[in-house]
Amino acid sequence: MTQPTVKRPVIRPLPERLINKIAAGEVVERPSAVVKELVENAMDAGSTRIEIIVEKSGSRLIKIVDNGWGIPADQIEIAFSRHATSKITGFSDLDSITSYGFRGEALPSIASVSRTRMVSRTADAEVGTEIIYEGGVLQSRKPAAAPVGTTIEVENLFFNTPARRKFLKTETTEARYLSRIAMALAIGRCDIAFSFSMNGRTVFSLPASELGPRVSGLLGFGKGMVKVSGDPGPVSIAGYIGKPDQAQSNRWGHFLFINGRYIQSATLSHAFGAGYGDLLPKGLYPIGALLLTVNPAEIDVNVHPAKTEVRLSQEWEIHDAIVSCIRDGLRHDGIIPVFKTGDKEPDIRVANRLAFANPETVSRQQAIPGMGARGFVNPEQMRELYSLPDRSTPNVGGESPAVVRVDTSTGEILDTPSAPTTDRTPELPATDSSESSLPVSIAADNIRLVGRFSDLYMIMQAGDDLYIVDQHTAHERVLFEETLRKIEKHQMVGQHLLLPVQVELNPEQFAVYTEAGQLLNEAGFGVAEFGGRTVRIETVPILLSGKSPERVFRKVIDDIASLKKTGYDLKKAMAQSIACRAAVMAGDRLNDREAVGLLERLLKCENRYSCPHGRPTFVRISRADLDRQFGRG
């Protein structure tokens, strides 16, 4: 039986037009990519004013107008040739790229999938030159009246690549991408005047300005933002970031730039959020812009034709530098306070200026004036809303309360006339709740425990203000800091089980155990391999001694795995998981003595305003707020 003859394929160069169309698939992913490439060309041309005009989310028209140097008439056609550029000339230039463009792919790629018209004139030319391409084919070239600079119009994008046009998102989605890239370009070069119009409506028009006003105007809606700056290690950092109440549910609100170039980096984006620590609840992300200056020789921008991905030789050093600068900026602005021994300002007053309003506690935004759309108190109004009177308010019930005096500058207990308190975790379940029916106060700041609600919230009074403390988040914060400190000092103590427990882990859990096994033992778990994916538990941390060993061990392993995926430090992940599992829960009744002990320990915490997950430990309702609700304002 004869074999069928197979025709041998012939190797040959692809036609130039086909090459450009293939390249367009990488460079021109969507209309926003066209805007980015053309505006970066305008910035490379020394422009001081750039206009971006878009119709029908870029599929009908993208128009960029600049007042840059312009293109000479004898070079305008060469500009549409593949790999033609004025940005680099030799191999050495690739090691230190300072321009936005350098590959020479953008113009021919864009022209190959659209109808492109360019009019450009240099300062020494009497007239400009108009050139038109359609589907990559030159249609006309002629002199034209034009101001100095370049105007480029891209119409009917992807008209000859229906597959790419079909996979564009909805107009609304593409408009979001366009707005984001326009904002990024404007933030990265605040020395250039920018205007952006879509469908005949001006989205923004910005004169050349300083970085602060531009970031605040575009991202902060005119609200004050936190300045971030520093020169730590291999990077110089300048920027402005939003306060915690301005956080969003996605990462679209933060922008990163390296040497003026807008970039995307999972590592550096993580650093952006990590700088806030526990100030941001889980699922919320900060807004702001950070402009990083790095030695060009330490960056590789030739990773992808879109040039938004870069490689950094000292990526993690830069990551840590960003985290450090953001924390310093928040401390300097008062968002993260620095407590010093001898500071006479009561901690509760600092806390009041930083407290978040819990949306689960306050059901309506109007319940507390100044509450933001996401349930956070507007920090612009914190100073006014959260001031405490200096006078004390007598006990409403007329009874003589048990008093615990605390030096709020250090958290030290000065005296306990009623009974000495111990530095132990409140026992759960609570002892007889009828042990004390009298309110208990921390008299140093006129704070008085006046009641409880739903066996979860402790209600305190300070002057004319009410403070509602979430016992679970407060206890979780206390246990987190105490546990982390003991882990770091190798002071965690385990409780031996009467009978050891064997636990079979799934492959992912066993991989986490293999990585964190030593730290688990340092945290109070006496665990060893028992063959296959089975481990043998002999001790558990004393904090968790009342829990099911098997269940709590699996939960801790799962928590560590989840937190590590977000870049969380392993020791912190361990401490957070243990604290969450050991903290008092809703329905666990604390007697007055245990409640006071918890408040004392909360005052000693480094961050007493939120739990490790970012949820607030307390909220405040002022007398003025209540008066307004009852029509007395």
Image (cartoon, rainbow, N blue to C red):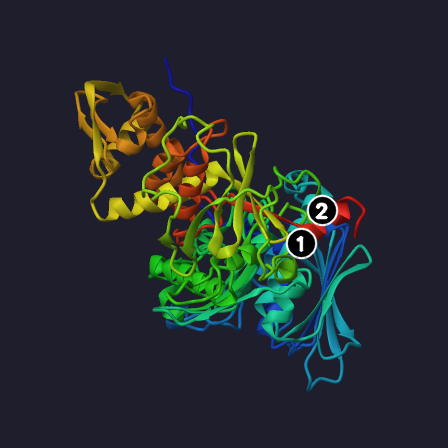
Q: Amino acid at mark 1?
A: Leu
Nearer to us in this view, 215 or 437? 437
Apparent side of residue 133 relative to residue 234 in the rendered image (left or right): right
Q: Residues within 10 Å of mark 1 (few under 14, many from 20)?
A: many
Apparent side of residue 595 relative to residue 71 in the rendered image (left or right): left
Q: Secondary structure at mark 1?
A: helix
Numbered circle sitting on residue 538: none
Residue at the image point whose x is 50% and y is 44% from the top: 401
Residue 186 in sight from this viewpoint: no
108 over 69 or under it: above or below: above
Q: Amino acid at mark 2?
A: Leu
Q: Quadrant of the N terminus?
A: top left
Numbered circle sitting on residue 178: 1
Provide residue 360's location: percent of width, then percent of height.
Answer: 61, 37
Provide residue 443's location: percent of width, then percent of height.
Answer: 48, 53
Nearer to us in this view, 314 or 489? 489
Nearer to us in this view, 113 or 554? 554
